[in-house]
Amino acid sequence: MFKKKDKKELQEKAKLKESKKYKSMNKEEIIRKLIEKEEVLKNIEEELSETRKMVQEKDNLSEEYLKHLERLQADFDNYKKRQEKKQKEFIEFANERLLNNLLSVVDNLERALDSTKNNKNAKAIKEGVNNTLKEFNAILNKEGVKPIQSIGHRFDPYKHEAVMKTETDKYSEDIVTEEFQKGYYIKSKVLRPAMVKVAVSTKEKKDTDKK
C-alpha cells in the first residue's frame, strides 16, 4: 500500500507530465500556424508582385496608346490643313479659265480704243468702249486679276514671253522695251505672261542675225 505522501507525489508528477505535454503541443501548433502564415504571406507577396507587373504593363500599354492617339491627332491636323489649303486654292483659281477668256475681250477693247485715236468722229464710240473697259478692269481687279508691269522692267521668263529682241540705247540689256500683249496675275500666280520685246546688246544681235 502506498502512503498518502507517495500518492500525492505521483499525482503531482502526472500533472507535471500532462502539463509539459500540453505545453509541447501548443508550441508545435504555434510553429505550424506560423509556418502557415508565412506561406500565406509569401503567396500574398507573389500575388502583389504579379499585380504590380500587370499594372506596369497596363501603364506602358496606356502610354503607347496615348502616343499613338497623339500621332493620329497630329496626322489628322496636318491632313485637315492640307485639305483647307487645297480648298482655298481651288476656290481662288476656280475661275481662272473664265478670267483668262475675259482677258481676250479686254485685249480687243484696248485695240478698239487704239484704232480710234486718229478718228475725231469716233469720240462717242471711244467713250463707250472706254467705259466698258473700265467695268471689265473693275471686275477683274475684284477677282484678284492685276496687270504685270513690263516696260522698263528686267525680263523675267516666268512673267514675260519674249517675241522680239531689239538693239537700243534707251534701255539696258534684258530690259523690256515694248509690250505687245499685257500679262496678268491672279492673286500671286501668273495668269498669263506678257508678250514683249526685249533689249539686247549689239554683239548678241549680230550672233542672232548670223543664225
Image: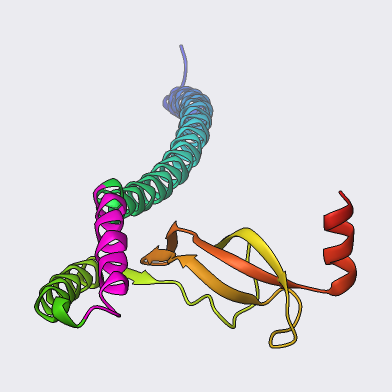
Left or right, 175 with respect to 195, comes to right
Q: Residue at x 45, y 45 (%)?
A: 71
Q: Residue at x 86, y 65 (%)?
A: 204
Residue 186 versus residue 146 in the image, above or below: above
Q: Residue at x 16, y 71 (%)?
A: 129
User: Which picture quadrant has residue 59?
Assistant: top left
Q: Is residue 144 visible?
A: no
Q: Residue at x 50, y 40 (%)?
A: 60
Q: Is residue 202 visible?
A: yes
In percent of width and height, residue 81 lies at 36, 53
Kindly give the residue lying farthest to the top in the view shown. 1
| Observer-nearest of 15 and 174 | 174
| Observer-nearest of 22 and 165 | 165
In percent of width and height, residue 200 lies at 77, 71
Q: How is the image coloured?
A: rainbow
Q: Which residues are magenta?
A: 98-119
Q: Is residue 73 magenta?
A: no
Is the magenta region chiefly helix, strand or loop? helix
| Observer-nearest of 32 and 179 | 179
Left or right, 207 with respect to 200, comes to right
In percent of width and height, residue 116 lies at 25, 74
Q: Is residue 99 magenta?
A: yes
| Observer-nearest of 67 and 74 | 74
Left or right, 158 with respect to 172, comes to left
